[in-house]
Amino acid sequence: MSNQGTPHHSHKLRHYIIMTTLVVLGLFVLLLFNNNSDGFGFTSAVVENVRNNSIIGSLGHSDSKIAEDAELLKVEPISKGPNDIEFELSSAVIPQVQKDTKIDGLEIIFNDLTASIKVNDDKLELNDLKQVALGIKGFTGYLAFDETQFTLDGIIKSLAVNGITLSASKDIKLSFNNLNYQQAKLSGAEFKTIEFVSGPGKVLVPGRLDYGLEDGQLVTIYNYYGSLALKKENKEDINQTTSTESSTLIGGYAKGLDVVSGALNINLR
């Protein structure tokens, strides 16, 4: 009678061996994809979900939450060197900047869904969203912005879209061109020079200078390190005419700061 049970046990053994082999093979395939250096690996699934809005729609920021985040775009200066000038500058004009730079963090709020945003050469589709909050960490590359548009082309460490973080084991390529933005904050930013013609505003250097800026004054900041907050706000007058008001807050440290207007020259070193 013992011999009659042998084929049954042999069949079960073969079944277990086949199932174990399939499980091990499946784990091997997953590890292979995860270690692929040419792309995101597992993160590619997150990118695909962002394209399809399946994650963004259910887990992303609500419009009210984005509005709350927008109010938190305040400058927090970061020390760079003991002999640098610590200052804070506000102006009703957003500077025009076109520079290669390094930035610790960048936050952009926009509703321009027509802009082409590429992540590792793949287009990031953001359909059916009213507003987008884009968070970037560890940027190195080319940056340009003015009172209307924002351009970026370089390498980043991580990217967040409405609270959903996309990351990879290696650096991520990110680029977009002429993005029409509403607000932006740069933290831990490095620029050799920032030069612009000011609007009404103020320059404050603790213990040295408290000066009100006027329209048309040339401001030059040398070897700058710190944070910038840029904001555009639509205003409607009594005639229902809409206009855009801009503002800039720059805070941080620099090797030098010049303000020039006609016979007036302020040079801090």
Image (cartoon, rainbow, N blue to C red):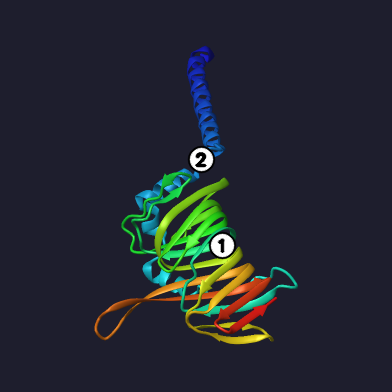
> For the residue carrying disc 2, how many other residues have a C-alpha within 10 Å: few (<14), some (14-19), or many (20+)?
some
User: How crowded is the residue under tag 1: few (<14 C-alpha within 10 Å), some, or many (20+)?
Assistant: some
Image quarter (top left, top right, bottom left or bottom right) of the C terminus: bottom right
Q: What residue type is labelled 1?
A: Gly
Task: Name the residue carrying label 1.
Answer: 105
Place of residue 261 in the rendered image (x, y in percent of width and height, measured from the top left):
55, 81
Give how far across and how far down residue 124 sits, in percent: 40, 50
Q: Is residue 255 above or below residue 216?
A: above
Q: What residue type is labelled 2?
A: Gly
Which one is closest to the eye, mark 1 or mark 2?
Answer: 1
Q: Which residue is drawn at 39% across and 75% down?
A: 233
Q: Which of the numbered marks, if any, corresponds to residue 39?
A: 2
- Residue 157: which disc? none
Q: Nearer the viewer, residue 48 or 260?
A: 260
Residue 218, position as x, y percentages in the image: 54, 76
The x and y percentages for residue 135 are: 50, 60
